[in-house]
Image (tube, rainbow, N blue to C red):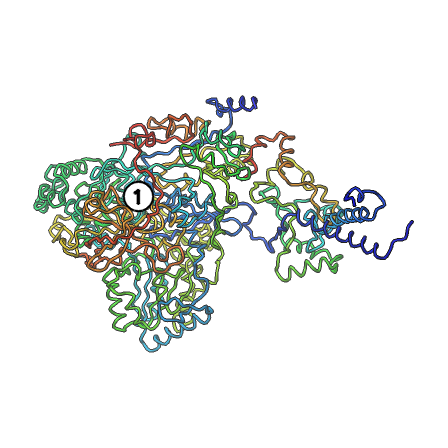
Amino acid sequence: MSTFVEKLRQYRKPGYYDKFDYHWTMTIDLDRCTGCEACMVACQAENNLPIVGEKRFAENREIKWIRIERYWEGEYPDVKMRFIPMLCQHCDDAPCETACPVFATYHNQDGLNTQIYNRCIGTRTCAVYCPYEVRYFNWFTYTWDEPLEQQLNPDVTVREKGVMEKCTFCIQRIRIAKDNAKDDDRRRVRDGEVVPACVQSCPTEALVFGNSNDPEAKVSKMMKNPRGYKVLEELNTTPSIVYLTKVHS
Amino acid sequence: MSKISRRDLLQYIGAGGIGVVGGVLYGESVQQNVELLIPQVVPPEDYSPGVATWYNTVCNQCPAGCGISVRIREGKAKKIEGNPVHPVSQGRTCARGQAGLNALYNPDRIRTPLQNVGQRGSGNFEEISWDEALTTVGSRIGRLKIDNEASRVRLLCGRVRGHLDELFLQFMNLLGSDHYQQYDFTYPSALMAANKMSFGTDVLPYYDIRNAVFLLSFGADYLGTWISPVHHSLAYGHLRQGREGRRGKTIQIEPRMSLSGAAADEWIAARPGTEGLLALGIAHALVSEGHYHGSDRDEWSKALQAYSPSLVSAETEVSEDKILRLAREFGTSTASLAIAGGATAAGTNAVASIVAVNALNYLAGNLSQPGGIIFNPDPAFSATAGSRQAGFQGMLDLIGAMKAGDVDVLLVHDTNPVFALPDNVGFRQAMQNVPLIIALSSFRDETTEMADLILPTSTYLESWGDDVPDPGVGFPVASISQPVVATLYDTLPVGDIVLSLARQIGGELPIHMRWGTMEEFIKERWREEYDQRGSEGEEQEFEAFWQAALEAGVWGQPGAVAGDQPVPLSSSMIASIADPVSRFAGDESDYPFVLHPYLTATFFDGRGANLPWLQEMPDPMTSVVYGSWVELNPVTADELGIREGDVLDVESPAGSVRVPALIFPAIRPGVVAIPVGQGHAAYGRYARDRGVNPIHIVATLIDDQSGDLAWAATRVKLKLTGERLQIIKTDGVTRTLGRQILGPENDHA
Amino acid sequence: MSISVLDALRPGKKPALLGLVLVFGLFVGAWVHGKYFSDRSPIQPIEFSHMIHATDNEIPCQHCHIYADRTPVAGVPSVSKCMGCHNSVPSVREHPEILKLVAYWEKREPIPWIKVHDLPDFVHFTHKRHIRAGLACQECHGPVETMNRITRVATMRMPWCVDCHTERNVEHGRDCWTCHK
């Protein structure tokens, strides 16, 4: 047990993940985001998110790995709407990872907070620990009305009742990019080769994704923007998503 | 050894037998399910198992004409993304575009030709064969043609462009009927009419939002629904953060905050119907404050005399200071652009308002300037497709003809007037007078339900076609649409149905329309275009060009010169404006609220309602899923004692709908808004019997100049029914309450 | 009267013998199942012999499993591929198994081979990476070239995968998401 605690401490030291090839990171420019939700449908298509139906929605059983949160500011007539896309922050110090009794969720060497469906026993502790509320539990085994199932992405597992799921940063796309890099005898994937579904679809190019261990990557440059901040930073979760705050004019 | 009795032997054999059977059963129970390994009989050339291939085609979820790439694995479509080399979408897509896969794999698609066997509209259909269906239609139309009665055949379709439009036109011409019309609720008729008046052009110009520095939008939800949302979103991103150190500013003027209003730096809720007047007031201030330096300054100043900011301020309820400030910013920014759409383009003053907005653009000197209005060249082909838009008047004419019994055969394709016209124009009732209605459709929407015969069309992802995006992007562009998967059911692409009908009818039709398939037709037309453009040459060359165009999904001439420069705008245009303020149906004392129906980024004009991903996509502004609602200002709601979920009767002079209330902070008091899109009586399991359709209760006021339906000019009253209904939405707390969510400067308690 | 089960265990007693026969029968049954009905070595629609093809005729694996070094899936040869060769092998043209093949071809139907090496749907596995890493086919599939009927020799279960990844020190080879999807 003590060696495990040792190990955990080591993992949680700041900068631990810098020594690896990748630290997948996303920046979201709220000054570009229009709240159009193209990312949500892109994610649904890419990651086999279920169609839960009206009844389940009413019971708050919906599953959306990325969602747009809306916040009103002020009152009419000086009222403003603020959108913020919310998805798994892939925290370096993720509260969910310490909570899982069966290690179904853990941090991998790429800086991804990952979820192993086969291992998950559905205690839902991680969802309770997550301050961003981006973990979704499968209360039911969802089915697709034939022939909608023909669209299902074969690179992504269809989850069943009783397991937790969440954003993977489209790990299947990372995998394909790494595979291509290996074919070309490259050690690392090039910047821009991995584009998660949400980032790909974004019509205003608000989302940027890349390897922040690569100082030349676009995402590394975006992270240096003075408008950058992390959501609920005071909780010390060290998220891998940097938001760029909206500009007031 | 002792002797084994016969009885014992049987017992041993029995035990052994049970053991063996048990063993086999055990083996069977621990075994995996048998999975088969099915080889190809003959492998296709470009096939690799487990590897995705991408095909480029054109999106058909809205009329913008975005190029899309579809990911195919083992013959199944998996994902739609934007086509990176297409100038409209540039690799991006909206939510609706991606949900196209739900249309392709929709469980409620029509799978075979159907014949109505019950009462019309009852939905009792029986499957029939294509032969039978085509013979029925062919002989009926053929007989009319022989009797010289072909003008009793009418064709009504949605917004069709490209060579499919030509095919339809040719079919009807050869038949001898000039009743080929299109009806699309979202067609910007008023914008076209106003631009024709202002600039003398029939082609939508390119609104260069990308390079604008100051964008003034009068009701146009350019990020959600207005003419080319994906392209505008790309442009918006650039306007905000694409230029180092120079962030563009946007202002939105509309009574109810749309997506574009939420994105804007300033949202101004002028009195509904006075947006055009506000534009004139800004124009007045712009000239009188000396921000316009043209030689015709005096004329403009005279023309705008009546619209002084103080007067306009009183009418529009926008403060004079604000008008002056807007005029100053608009006049002095390096690249200002004003656009108009949405409710501003749907009052009785629609054309007048847009003309006023065009005048603003002229006064800011942005015509044919970067960041302004760039005039598009004539489209590569199908330049006149827009002229076939029936508009509201055309639909009234059609209804009249149907009622008078002048229509024997009505062919309907890809348009849903039963849904997208006010109830009291009686389209559905008039259809009862038509002896034969044939729907060419993929889904059983309200209009298709009324058909006697349904010829099922393949979806756009299974069909050949081509398209010229409208609005264009400032240079000649054409896209090719190709089937990305094999046809799922016993359906035909609509072009192929028309060609089959032509063969069936016979006479000179199949002589002129000699193509076997749509693919053949498109390819021949593209060859002609290719030859005309001066690159006549070897067969080989066209084949290479065709292959390249197919692969890219698009052809364009980025360097080509844009269309003619427009004549300078004359100030006399202002004089043509009789009334810059919209009238409303219904007396204010009886109907105290203005009804603001709005197109949604989710369902557009309702055509997306049958796609489950879109039903499950929270409405961007309210987070509501699966249903309709009526939006009320919190103060108004408070006064009337209405809470969220109270079911209201929203009653207009033309009808009423029953819908739950939603308190919405960003709507002008005195205005109530209902989203368009839900309220289908048919259209498959995901759309049917869900919510209400505000178009049905719109009064039939028309725009003074274009004659189009003024769908934002109806007044309503609200009645509490006492019922309550849960509005299903994903939002919880809609204020940040000082939490660190929106960033250091943006978190307000 | 004493009630005892010990009696039954005493050799020479009939119930014990019966039990023994039963247990023996169980083993026989399981063996028979394994030999003739098992998913490890199911009877295929055509009695295809890798021995004849790979050993006797020295056809390399990837001549037929053409996608193995290019895609995640090794691929079974298409029916047209089988026919492509067999059209020019007159010596076995009348062989009953070849006649079955011809029948499939003439009906333009695929051969419903039974999958022997099957991984669950939640596993990401790519032949390409393993082949390009220099693994021989036999390391996972066993001496296929000696088999008349194809038989699975490895468990194809997670410990077996992980053991190999560990042994060979595969980079991130024990990260769950290397194989899980």
Q: Quadrant of the C terminus of chain A?
A: top left
Percent coordinates x, y for residue B523 in the rendering: 43, 57
Q: Quadrant of the N terminus of chain A?
A: top right
Percent coordinates x, y for residue C16 in the rendering: 80, 46
Q: How many marks?
A: 1
Q: Is residue B151 visible?
A: no
Element marked by disc 1: loop
Task: Name which residue type carries label 1.
Answer: Met
Percent coordinates x, y for residue A74 in the rendering: 24, 35
Residue B243 placement: quadrant: top left
User: Looking at the image, which is closer to me, B733 or B418?
Assistant: B733
Q: Residues within 10 Å of mark 1 (few under 14, many from 20)?
A: many
State the residue position of label 1.
B621
Residue C41 lies left or right of residue C68; in this view the side is right
Please identify the residue farthest to the bottom as the structure is shown.
Answer: B147
Image: B569 above or below A82 = below
Residue A199 placement: quadrant: top left
User: Looking at the image, which is closer to me, C62 or B546?
Assistant: C62
Please identify the residue farthest to the right as the structure is shown.
Answer: B1
Image: C106 above or below B238 = below
Q: Chain of mark 1?
A: B
User: Looking at the image, which is closer to me, B229 or C44?
Assistant: C44
Residue B30 lies left or right of residue A241; in this view the side is right
Percent coordinates x, y for residue B231 in the rendering: 33, 44
User: Looking at the image, which is closer to me, B748 or C48?
Assistant: B748
Residue C134 lies left or right of residue B597; in this view the side is right
Residue A59 lies left or right of residue B718; in this view the side is right
Q: Is residue C120 visible?
A: yes
